[in-house]
Amino acid sequence: MDSHLNIRPARLKDFDELLFIEEQAHIYPWPESTLHWCLEQPHLRCFVLQQKTTIVGFAVYECVLDEATLLNIAINPDFQAQGHGRELLRQSLRELDVTIARIFLEVRISNEAALCLYQSEGFIEVGQRKNYYPTAEGREDARVFELDLE
């Protein structure tokens, strides 16, 4: 793991880089407008993981009272499979307000890499959402996970 990875809040001037990562990392990326909206919302926390000056990935959380939902996490494909997703997850969780007691997230049932990551980081499956994600064939279920920080 490269020790030169640092996390910081995302800024509007990061938008083009974040959009590039979003479009490269996801089969069904968020629309440009959604990503832009996220950077402007006070109840959303957006973080970038950097290697020197290069943004390798980002994470977006929605925080409501003592709960946060990981809405999006993406690593530039050039930096995938190197532990950066785990590093981004760990560092971004530490950056959330101390009042946050639980983290929720959804994962495509077909996303083995993400499922392994979240389970190895202590997330517990708490449910499923039917037909949650779009696919080429129609829709795909999501598995819902929770991490208790207390």
Image (cartoon, helix red, strand yellow):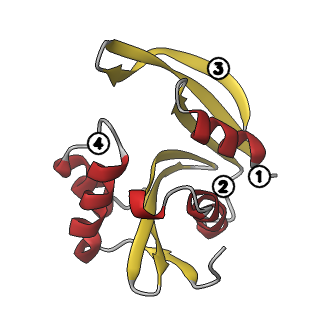
Q: Which mark is residue 149?
A: 1
Residue 49, above or below 46: below
* Number of the label disc, if any, that sits on residue 29: 4
Q: How far is the residue under mark 1 from the one under mark 2?
A: 8 Å
Which numbered disc, 1 or 2, marks the residue closer to the eye?
Answer: 1
Looking at the image, do the residues carrying marks 1 and 2 touch, with CB atoms under 8 Å apart?
yes
The amino acid at mark 4 is Pro
Tell me residue 89's x, y (percent).
61, 58
Q: Position of residue 25 (x, y in %)?
A: 37, 49
The mark lying in front, picked from 4 and 3, is 4
Q: CA distance from mark 2 to mark 4?
A: 27 Å
Q: Position of residue 126 (x, y in %)?
A: 70, 25
Crowding near pointer 1: few (<14 within 10 Å), some, many (20+)? few
Residue drawn 50% across the image and 57% down it: 80
Location of mark 2 (residue): 100
Q: For the residue marked with disc 2, what is the amino acid? A: Ile
Question: Marks 1 and 4: in contact by CB < 8 Å?
Answer: no
Compared across the picture, whether 89 is left or right of 16 comes to right
Front disc: 2 or 4: 4
Which of the two residues, 62 or 4, is positioned nearer the viewer here? 4
Residue that label 3 marks? 127
- Front tag of 3 and 2: 3
Could you say whether the residue bearing mark 3 is in a helix, strand or loop?
Answer: strand
Residue under the point 26% across and 50% down:
23
| Left or right: 134 as drawn, with respect to 141 | left
The earlier-in-sequence mark between 4 and 1 is: 4
Mark 4 surroundings within 10 Å by alpha-carbon count, few (fewer than 14), some (14 through 19), many (20 or more): some
What is the three-letter code of the residue carrying label 1? Leu
Q: Going 62% across and 61% down the picture, which residue do you hit?
A: 83
